[in-house]
């Protein structure tokens, strides 16, 4: 069959690219090896899909080219996607830090995207293995289907149990595009050696400020039997590199609080002072790690200040991450230097596009990666639609 565009991947970016191009008059085919469209959408946000964020801004995305995201995000914003959600009658609510979720189910977002595709006359073919991709005389061939435009929307290898693969990178390399080495992102970190003492408090969470390099996030951290997780850790993991340290501030205004505890309960020990503000098991583990054994009243203020410094900069050197199986997204991907930031089209291969997680763009936790999927998908869809007018 002959189409105007073949889109590889029936995830968020691929479906919205297809709908946008289809509604502009293009004849579009979507191919996916999965049996169901939007599988990652369905499991996102605890089943309610954190579909965007009120605070979308270019600085909330990582890429070798920090400026690349600006055009697509400006031309299709979080407000544009929210308008689409509301037009479909999907009730939503805002949670912490600007995160927007469906009141009902993530399936509402998938159904919305499928309906938008239906309105554009898009053909969606599931449970279909994508074989060899040919390129001849300005057209692309996938199996028996051909089109002058091909959109790579197959995502990255994160969450392989959902069928995720690194096929996008092989396609990029087939057409001479470079790939920024992919790695797990928004992923729990593992600890080893003496730092595993926190294994004893697995399941304990508390608010922290997590820091790596010159970046910090103020959210919750979760101590696990393998190391560290929770929103703050997932966020900082995208900036962490193997061999580097991360620092946690587990007690804000620690010096002031310890001095107050010294005045209030001089016969108490550090654990008791920490337990006033932190979960008891965490207070015990921190006191053991710091090793101050004297009563608070016997400690000079200098020692309290040194202890406070430790509590506000508790340093760990992770041994690694929990890998793609636990990573919410993939950092790295198809090099943005090869793509137009306005259309997502490859500069050296006319008609070839890459969108969503397949590209070297990674957003923060909290709806940012979905917004990149929507914005980049619309950019490609509009560009394809403009060709057939």
Image (spheres, rainbow, N blue to C red):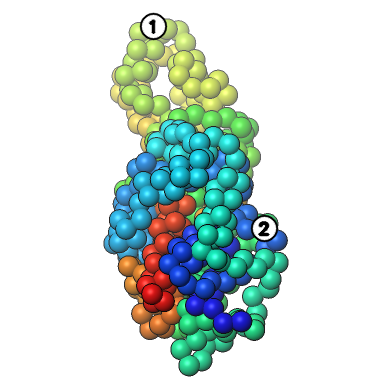
Q: Residue at x 51, y 40 (%)?
A: 90
Q: Residue at x 57, y 82 (%)?
A: 2
Who is closer to the viewer here, 74 or 299? 74
**Picture coordinates of residue 171 (x, y %)?**
53, 78
Secondary structure beneath dot 2 equals loop
Q: Is residue 327 visible?
A: no
State the quadrant of the N terminus: bottom right
Instruction: Judge the density around disc 1: few (<14), some (14-19), many (≥20) Cα neighbours within 10 Å.
Output: few
Do the CB atoms of the residues marked 2 and 1 lie less than 8 Å apart?
Answer: no
Q: Is residue 279 left or right of residue 375?
A: right
**Picture coordinates of residue 271 (x, y %)?**
50, 19
Camera-side mark, 2 or 1: 2
Is 215 drawn above or below residue 379 in the view shown?
above
Q: Which residue is mark 2?
A: 36
Q: Which residue is mark 1?
A: 264
Circle nearer the N terminus (2, 1): 2
Q: Residue at x 40, y 58 (%)?
A: 375
Is 301 drawn above or below residue 216 in the view shown?
above
State the quadrant of the C terminus: bottom left
Is 272 drawn above or below residue 305 in the view shown?
above
Is 186 drawn above or below residue 270 in the view shown?
below
Residue 320, picture quadrant? bottom right
**Picture coordinates of residue 154 (x, y %)?**
55, 66
Who is closer to the viewer here, 190 or 11? 11
Kindly report the distance in space between the C-alpha atoms of the residues bearing marks 2 and 1: 61 Å
Who is closer to the viewer here, 216 or 388? 388
């Amino acid at each position: 069959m002959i189409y105007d565009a073949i889109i590889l991947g029936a995830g968020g970016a691929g479906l919205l690219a297809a709908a946008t191009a289809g509604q502009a008059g293009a004849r579009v085919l979507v191919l996916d090896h999965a049996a169901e469209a939007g599988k990652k959408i369905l499991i996102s946000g605890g089943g309610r899909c954190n579909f965007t964020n009120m605070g979308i801004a270019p600085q909330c995305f990582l890429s070798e080219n920090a400026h690349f995201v600006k055009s697509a995000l400006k031309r299709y914003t979080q407000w544009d996607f929210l308008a689409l959600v509301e037009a479909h009658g999907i009730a939503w609510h805002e949670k912490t830090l600007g995160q927007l979720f469906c009141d009902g189910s993530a399936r509402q977002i998938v159904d919305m995207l499928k309906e938008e595709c239906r309105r554009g006359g898009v053909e969606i073919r599931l449970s279909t293995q994508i074989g060899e991709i040919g390129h001849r005389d300005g057209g692309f061939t996938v199996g028996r289907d051909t089109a002058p435009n091909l959109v790579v929307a197959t995502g990255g290898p994160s969450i392989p149990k959902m069928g995720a693969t690194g096929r996008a990178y092989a396609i990029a390399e087939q057409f001479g595009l470079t790939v920024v080495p992919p790695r797990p992102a928004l992923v729990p970190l593992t600890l080893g050696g003496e730092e595993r003492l926190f294994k004893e408090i697995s399941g304990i969470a508390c608010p922290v400020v997590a820091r790596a390099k010159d970046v910090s996030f103020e959210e919750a951290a979760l101590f696990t039997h393998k190391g560290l997780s929770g929103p703050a850790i997932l966020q900082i993991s995208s900036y962490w590199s193997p061999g580097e340290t991360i620092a946690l501030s587990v007690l804000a205004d620690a010096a002031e609080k310890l001095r107050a505890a010294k005045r209030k309960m001089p016969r108490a020990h550090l654990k008791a002072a920490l337990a006033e503000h932190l979960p008891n098991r965490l207070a015990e583990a921190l006191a053991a790690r710091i090793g101050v054994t004297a009563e608070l009243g016997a400690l000079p203020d200098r020692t309290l200040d040194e202890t406070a410094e430790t509590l506000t900069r508790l340093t760990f050197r992770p041994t690694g991450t929990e890998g793609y199986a636990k990573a919410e997204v993939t950092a790295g991907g198809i090099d943005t230097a090869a793509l137009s930031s306005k259309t997502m089209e490859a500069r050296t291969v006319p008609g070839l596009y890459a969108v969503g997680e397949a590209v070297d763009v990674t957003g923060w936790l909290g709806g940012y990666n979905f917004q990149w999927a929507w914005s980049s998908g619309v950019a490609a869809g509009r560009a394809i639609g403009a060709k057939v007018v």
